[in-house]
Amino acid sequence: MFNNQNLVKYVIMLFIVASSTFYIPSCSIINEHALYIGLLAASTFVLLDRFMPHIVIIENKNNSNNILNE
C-alpha cells in the first residue's frame, strides 16, 4: 500500500510538526498533545498525497494556431 519513500516522508512530517509544536510556543504543551497535532498533520498529508497526487497541466502551445485554422 505504501512504499518506503512515502513512509519516510510521512514520518519526517510527523516529527517536524510534533517537535515544532512542542518547542515553538511560549506556553508549554504536553508531549502527548504535540504528538496528537503531529499525527493530525501527518495523516492530513497522507490523505492529500494519496488522493491528490501530482497534478500536471499540459498546455497545447499550438492552441492559437488551431483556432485560426478552424
Image: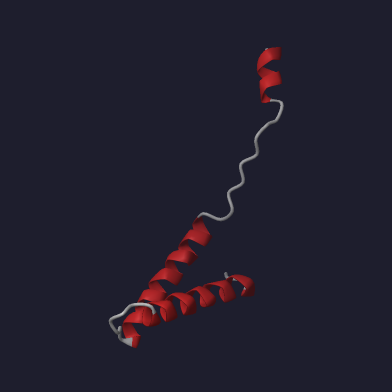
Q: Nearer the viewer, residue 57 or 51?
A: 57
Which image quarter holds the C terminus? top right
Q: Residue at x 67, y 21 (%)?
A: 64
Number of labels in the image equals 0
> Which residue is at the far left?
27
Residue 5: image location, x then y, percent: 63, 72
In the image: residue 6, left or right of residue 66:
left
Residue 67: image location, x then y, percent: 65, 17
In the image: residue 42, left or right of residue 37:
right
Which image quarter holds the N terminus? bottom right
Q: Is residue 39 above or below residue 49?
A: below
- When asked about the image quadrant of residue 36, the answer is bottom left
Residue 38: image location, x then y, percent: 41, 76
> Which residue is at the far front?
26
Residue 43 visible in the displayed image? yes
Residue 35 visible in the displayed image? no
Q: Nearer the viewer, residue 38 or 19?
A: 19
| Display colour scheme | secondary structure
Q: Residue at x 42, y 77 (%)?
A: 20
Q: Is residue 64 above or below residue 47?
A: above
> Which residue is at the far bottom?
31
Q: Nearer the viewer, residue 26 or 2?
A: 26
Q: Residue at x 52, y 73 (%)?
A: 10
